[in-house]
Amino acid sequence: QVQLVESGGGLVPAGGSLRLSCAASGRTFSTNNMAWFRQAPGKEREFVAGSWSGGSTSYADSVKGRFTISRDNVKNTMYLQMNSLKPEDTAVYYCAARGWGNNPNVYAFWGQGTQVTVSS
């Protein structure tokens, strides 16, 4: 069982930055594939970025060059540094574990989400 707790969301003006954190329980954190997804009102949950157990990362085209995913395996925490935020980045952001790729349906564990609102 893996428990995930996100934090770091908030209200920020366009062009600003936020860093989200996802604290994970469990001793197998370092070997888990983990990812960030987001869901805006009325839209489907979409992939944002992934951190894979082999050390590689993936990003959605819409956030490449602006967002950076990282993880601290000592602290069992994953991060999402978000820079140059745009109003269209407004969504609830979720971290997910034990899956692969950009399909949210294949992930076994989810956090409760943290709201990110970017004002124009």
Image (cartoon, rainbow, N blue to C red):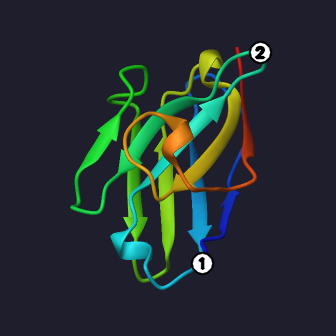
Q: Quadrant of residue 120?
A: top right
Residue at horizontal 61%, vertical 34%? 38
For image coordinates 66% across by 70% down, the residue present is 3
Where residue 70 appears, x then y in whole percent? Answer: 38, 57
In the displayed structure, 32 sits above or below 40; it is below
106 lies left or right of 66: right
Q: Which residue is mark 2?
A: 42
**Label 1 neighbourhood size at 10 Å, few (<14), some (14-19), many (20+)?**
some
Please, what is the three-letter code of the amino acid marked with disc 1? Answer: Ser
Image location of residue 107, percent across then percent down: 52, 49
Residue 79 position (above or below residue 40)? below
Residue beneath the point at 67% across and 58% down: 6
Looking at the rendered image, the quarter that the N terminus falls into is bottom right
Numbered label attached to residue 93:
none
Number of disc labels: 2
Rendered image: mark on residue 25:
1
Secondary element under disc 2, as helix, strand or loop, is loop
Which of the 4 image quadrants contains residue 12?
top right
Residue 56 in percent (x, y) is at: 23, 52
Q: Secondary structure at mark 1?
A: loop
Residue at the location (49% across, 32% down)?
Answer: 47
Cα distance, mark 1 to mark 2? 31 Å
Near-viewer residue (85 or 38): 38
Are the residues flagged by discs 1 and 2 in contact, CB closer than 8 Å? Answer: no
